[in-house]
Image (spheres, coloured by chain):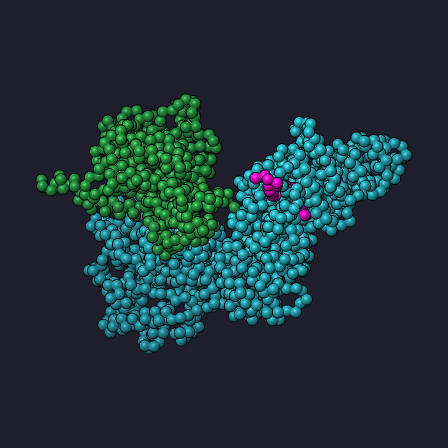
Chain colours: A cyan, B green
Amino acid sequence: MTRPAGTAELLRSGFTDGERAGRLLEELVERCGAGHLEDRRRLLEEFAGVADPDQALLGVVRLVEADGELVDMVATPGPARQRLLAVLGASSALTDHLVHHPEQVHAVSERAPVDPAAIPRSVAPVVAAAEAPERAGEEDLERRGMDALRVAYREQLVRVVADDLTSEDPLAAMPPVAAVLADLAGAALQAATDLARALVPGSGGVRFAVVGLGKCGGQELNYVSDVDVIFLAEPDAGTSDDEAVRVGERLASTVMRVCHASTSEGTLWPVDAALRPEGKQGPLVRTLASHREYYRRWARTWEFQALLKARPVAGDLELAQEWCGMVRPLVWGAGSQPGFVEEVQGMRRRVEEQVPSAESDRQLKLGPGGLRDIEFSVQLLQLVHGRADETLRSGTTLEALAALRDGGYVGREDAAALDTSYRYLRVLEHRVQLHRMRRTHLMPADEASLRRLGRAVGERGEAAAAVLQRWRSHQREVRRLHERLFYRPLLVAVAQLSTDEVRLTPEAARERLAALGFRDPAGAMRHLEALTSGVSRRATIQRHLLPVMLGWFAGGADPDAGLLAFRRISETLGSTHWYLRMLRDEGTAAQRLAHVLSTSRYVVDLLIRSPETVALLGDQAGLQPPGAEVLAARMAAASRRHQEADAAFLAVRTVRARELLRVVLADLVGDLDQAGVRSALTALTDCLLQAALEVATRVVLDRRGEEQAVDLLVVGMGRLGGAELGYVSDADVMYVYRPRDWDEQTAQRAAAQAEDIIAELRRGLSKPGPDPTLELDAGLRPEGRSGPLVRSLESYQAYYARWSAGWESQALLRARPVAGDERLAAEYESLIDPLRWPEGGLEARTVREIRRLKARMEGERLPRGADRRTHFKLGYGGLSDVEWVVQLLQLEHGHEVAALRTTSTLVAMQAAVEAGLLSSDDAAALRRAWSLGSRLRDAGVLWRGRPVDSVPSDARDAEGISRIIGRGPGQGGELADEWRRTARRCRQVVERVFYGEEPGSGAGGP
Amino acid sequence: MDRQQEYVLRTIEERDIRFVRLWFTDVLGALKSVAVAPAELEQAFVEGIGFDGSAIEGFTRVYEADMIVQPDAATFQVLPWRGDKPGTARMFCDIRMPDGRAAAADSRHVLRRALDSAGEDGFTFYTHPEIEFYLFKDPYEPGQPPVPLDHAGYFDHVARGDGHDFRRAAITLLEQMGISVEFSHHEGGPGQNEIDLRYADALSMADNIMTFRTVVREVALQHGAFASFMPKPLAEHPGSGMHTHLSLFEGDQNAFYEPTARYELSTVGRRFTAGVLRHAREICAVTNQWVNSYKRIWGGAEAPAHVCWGHNNRSALVRVPMYSIGKGHSRRVEIRSIDAACNPYLAFAVVLQAGLKGIREEYELPPEAEDDVWSLTPGERRAMGIAELPQSLGEAIAVMEDSELVAETLGESVFDFFLRNKRQEWADYRSQVTTFELDRYLVRL
């Protein structure tokens, strides 16, 4: 080297600090002495090949400083120097190690086979010394042994690192590297075991072995990670079981300490025995028999998953082998254990759950698209199918994946893509760990480290950006893992296509469906077959869609129902031009469809009645319910297109069916809240009644050939009047008419017309139609069921003046004109206002009567099978309780507090709070019960398609309802308690506020 | 496999045990028992044994009657009074639903939930009960007053005392069953005895109390007597309580102990005590669950009718006992209202939760009561802010109805069942015409 290297040239070679590199290079030349380092360009080329040239150069200088004899090697171009530079450039930790132990540089530079057996050999002298009769202090021997072990382990490790870093194809080299790392760990454990046996007195009479689990057992270890093991002890030659376990525990804890303790030579890695029976609570060491008992009776599915990778690694290998032989049948029988499906689903959920941490987007290992995701999914498939198919039982992820591919359990291309992604992610992980020899699974955040990492995996130029991009793209691949691994092969299994690929057998497909949560796998198979067989466009698109959709069905509360409904809808609509296109192209439409079908039988019923409404799912904005005016216009327009009565009613009800579905879908997958659902359902019913009244009027007048002689009014009562309808509510109504003229003839004709029109209205709405029938209940009319269905305004007037009972005033609190003539509506309201908001409030006597009436109703029998303690509507603290409280306040104070004059329960309650009639705490308890009760009733309809009156005792039903009201999976069991708690608190308020009881004033109560 | 269960199976074989009784407790504290043959036991450990829960007080609604008992191997004991060859043993059980969930109505589960809640705050809960009971001559003739076994008094040594032999026999049996007895003596009333159990964690202790009642009844029968834990069997003599010493431990440190504090009672201890006092009225229907319980509470003398605490004050509801310097681990408080006929699982659970609430919400301990509270006038007591426990079961139920604390502790369904059952008991009681009324009114009015 005759002149200093130019800064630009150095930068081109990958150095980042050219000036500093120049200085160091000069220093190196100086140390090597004149005549050496002739070929400067070759040297720079070799630096350019390493991950971090700056770090490598500094490392070389430090090495030469530490050991002058290395000068020759450093000065000689060729593979030896390349290997050294590669290690120095990739790992600052190993650089430090080599500077500390220059004698190991040859292990890096010379290409020689890795020799794990050298590690136990290194501690042999210490072992011999310990076993000698005049042994020195134990402390000292243990320390010497540990140091020797560490040095010997690193000597082998640097060989592996050098081989790894200089391999032609790091992805191809990844499995052998991981395997040899596992061998080194095994050898280190063997050395530690030898040492422990020499140090622990009385270990002669005990057989002791170490079984590797996890990545160590699977022969796919990282550079730095916990090594998972299980320790075994067995008595030998006259020792008792207890003695063997006692000595075994000392041996095991010594092995752990020997590997993990920090000495002047550093540490190896933590040995983790937490996967043993009973985990950290269990004894560290057990005998074979004790293990057998535990696994046979107690072990859970995830424990078997951990054992799947078990392999003897150290100590008495025969004993370890015996243990492995003992657990193997148990592992592969795990699939037939009770609760397997639930546990698998739970595990799957945990895997899919995002890791909530600030670093989650830098995780190589955890989270969706991470290494753990691949490993776990492969293991799950092994457990599901490995019972019947012994070829699937490899402990190594990549081998298992290949076996799954060969057996047809996973598609060939999918397996290949996953294989590549797994290797790439592992290589990244290895390189990240190498730098400081730390146990980490995070992508670096700083530019310099990313650059080093990028260069270490072969990126040049913008290495930092390039490695990030490539990592993200692999992550995306892996995210689609479940579709690829779990679902797609199911379709290949049922598709009747000629393909040379090996296919999942029907048995295996059924096993898998069961593991995914389908309760009737054979039925699911039939549906899949029907959906995907043939060569039609429909079958082709569905084959494409279903792998993803199956995953969504499996995530719902009732996967079987979802799949069946999908089949039925697809059979109806599959030949339309838009249906499949929408599912394929409209982003989330397919996901929403799968979700609602596996969540709600009510939706399924609606969709089966009018399948074309599925189109609503294609458009997120389409899930916003239109306002009442738009609805009214739509219905009016629809009815006007038809002269004939039945056709006109059908047209109106078709609009309703569509709008009802819109509300339900917006409820389940949109962002409509509960108040929104209630007001949308009310608006829909109002408009339906208005449109139906118009149709009926037109039809009747036509039929009678008369002029209209009457004005009509439909008054909504109950929840309809309160504008708080749910899916379950009947529509409580009353009918009012008034002749348009007062001469006797007109009056008579008016009465006849009114009766006819209302009869026609009821007929038109009660026939089977495209929408669920709206039950019109006129039971709240004067004289109840024995009174005339339709009355004139005058008749109401007369009746109210003379006969009206207290309960009628109360019922009128929620009377709201919903359809018909507006002037008549105004007059009717001015007629009833003095009744429902009586001037001066209520007399004490009336209040007493109302209380008594309520108490008597509580004393009466509930409907069959209903339980006063759990009934949503009539139970203690249920809907009816809340409504009575509010209504009593309205009757008493409506005349003086204008805001109380509303038909809405919640609005009136709020008004009562603002007027100081109800404390806000009490109102909160009432509101909670009313809202939860209403919601549960609605959720019951959505889930089962018919009303439920209390939280079902059937766990599946409770779960389904619990999910609909937005609780996470697996919480259905607590729903009943939650309702009872809410209702109990509500009831306390009811007793105090409604019955006027002082708290704790007696043992009365329910 | 669980070593404890292995041990049980081995012991059964070695000791030639032919019957194993699976014990559990209904909501009102009555002991229930199912006998199984040893061959079924392995199965019972793994899967439990099914039974019809609707037959048991407070367990289920009829339509979900299937329940499972699952023995807790840690509670295995041979029953010494059943003889040796062949022997009989017992285990306490947890009650589960067929899908593996713990049954809401299982008293052990209620207590366990409370202990878990304490565990979350790092506490374990220890109790040490002093159980009082009467021995009467067997058999009891309905309509006749019960005849006490002797006529001795507090701490009396009774020559030829059947009670003496009785206590020796009972203690021997208890010790054989692994229940350590701390102390035993003749109590104030004729035929009344007290046996104190050595402190243990609350769940084991509740199991022990259930065992204790059985043992005492068995031994009494062997001595030609019967034992009664009725809170107040004789109007003119003291009732039978179950004064219970309570302490919380954090690890192996007594959390109630603070060497420099007054009475060595730490802040945790003071707040715990404050919690027990503040909620004493609402938990009373659980700690004193019978109509008769209130006759003991309001029976005067040392009965704990007033909600206050004192140091060594035998009329206070909560007593902070004398301490011996340097015995930090034994620092404890004594709650004196609980009676011997309670369901110990539920009683311990509500007392614990009341105390924990005091700790969590940092209740202030009211001033100490230094006088005999019974000797104060009602006006004085009111001025001092000393409340009263409920006068009757009826009042106790009414107070409990509004208690979130009790509802949370018991769970909604036990809470509801308990209230309904107790209302019924109160109604039945009120419909009686008593001897008192006849004697006083019949002729005069």
The single residue placed furthest to the left in the displayed view is B444
Q: Position of residue A209 (x, y in %)?
A: 63, 42
Q: Which residue is nearer to you in this view: B116 or A618?
A: B116
Q: Does residue A287 lie above or below A565 as drawn? A: above
Q: Which residue is nearer to you in this view: B149 or A969?
A: B149
Residue shown at the point (59%, 40%) measured from the top left: A238
Q: Position of residue A138 (x, y in %)?
A: 65, 29
Q: Quadrant of the N terminus of chain A?
A: top right
Residue A655 occupies quadrant: bottom left
Q: Which residues are magenta?
A: A219-240
Q: Which residue is nearer to you in this view: A947 or A77?
A: A77
The single residue placed furthest to the front in the displayed view is B85
The single residue placed furthest to the right in the displayed view is A35
Q: Position of residue B40 (x, y in %)?
A: 44, 51
In the shown orientation, is residue B223 left or right of residue A473?
Answer: left
Residue shown at the point (28%, 41%) measured from the top left: B290
Residue A953 occupies quadrant: bottom left
In the shown orientation, is residue A803 left or right of residue A680?
Answer: left
Magenta span includes A221: yes
Q: Does residue B176 lie above or below B61 as drawn? A: above
Q: Does residue A310 lie above or below B119 as drawn? A: below
Q: Which residue is nearer to you in this view: A638 or A412?
A: A412
Residue shown at the point (32%, 41%) measured from the top left: B218
Q: Does residue A481 lie above or below B404 as drawn? A: below
Residue A552 in view in this figure: no
In the shown orientation, is residue A968 left or right of residue A850?
Answer: right
Residue B189 occupies quadrant: top left
Residue shown at the point (50%, 54%) measured from the top left: A339
Residue A976 in view in this figure: yes
